[in-house]
Amino acid sequence: MSTRIAVLGLGEAGSEIARDLVAAGADVRGYDPKDLSVDGVQPRASEAEAVADADIVLSVNSSHDAMTALENALPALRAGTLWADLNTASPGVKVALAARAAERDVPVIDVALMSPVPGKGLRTPMLVSGRGRPLPRPARGAGCRRGRPGGPAGTAISRKLLRSVFYKGLAAAVVEALRGAQAAGCADWLRGTSRRS
């Protein structure tokens, strides 16, 4: 029997992940409030219907909808079903999700997608934290690079957000240097210097 996976949110990221899961042989059912569908994914009318018989739930919605998706699914979630939250919510939201799900004995893992999903699907680099068991093979995907920093839910997303601050700061420094060089009349020199380094 194949792993039954519910994908909540079939937008840009969720649709690619769901498509890869189907290709990997998983039994996938999905729900999206905008009635989006993906070939091979069994459509469901609500979060609760999607998770009712799932072994794993991948919540791939917006950070604003993370808790709503869990609350809507909770009445139908079986104890022990793994809830994997893949959105970019704050660490506090991830901790709150884990606490709420624990009331129903549903383990939560925090999955931080470390690059854009389009074009990569399940091969997107991921960091995972939380008390849940590792994702089974179909949900990990062929070639998926992932790390497990340890710690509770919220740890993986904290690392992603810290990394984002670094990269955005680096990009801002480059832009500021180029603007300064342009004002000083030496933009070509700065560009040439950076190419030689």
Image (spheres, helix red, strand yellow):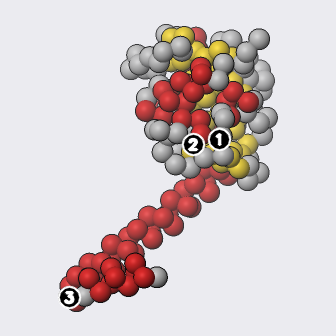
* Residue bearing the label numbered 2: 124
The residue closer to the viewer here, 22 or 42, is 22
The mark that comes first in sequence, 2 or 3, is: 2
Is 15 situated above or below 50? below
The mark that comes first in sequence, 2 or 1, is: 2
- Element at label 1: loop
The crowding category of the residue bearing disc 1, from other C-alpha atoms within 10 Å (few below 14, some 14 to 19, many at least 20), is: some
Residue 115, x across and y down, in percent: 52, 48
Looking at the rendered structure, the kind of residue marked 2 is Thr
Gap in angstroms between the C-alphas marked 2 and 1: 6 Å
Residue 144's quadrant in the figure? top right
Is 159 situated above or below 86? below
Looking at the rendered structure, the kind of residue marked 3 is Gly
Circles 2 and 3, Cβ within 8 Å, touching? The answer is: no
Residue 114, x across and y down, in percent: 56, 49
Is 21 situated above or below 156? above
Q: Is residue 187 visible?
A: yes
Circles 2 and 1, Cβ within 8 Å, touching? The answer is: yes
Looking at the rendered structure, the kind of residue marked 1 is Cys
Q: Could you tell whether 137 is left or right of 6 in the image? A: right
The crowding category of the residue bearing disc 3, from other C-alpha atoms within 10 Å (few below 14, some 14 to 19, many at least 20), is: few
Gap in angstroms between the C-alphas marked 2 and 3: 42 Å
The mark that comes first in sequence, 3 or 1, is: 1
* Residue bearing the label numbered 1: 144
Gap in angstroms between the C-alphas marked 3 and 1: 46 Å
**Label disc, if present, on residue 17 of the rendered structure:** none
The residue closer to the viewer here, 105 or 171, is 171
Is 195 situated above or below 13? below
Instruction: Please report the residue visible at 48 percent of the width from the left and 34 percent of the height from the top.
Output: 13
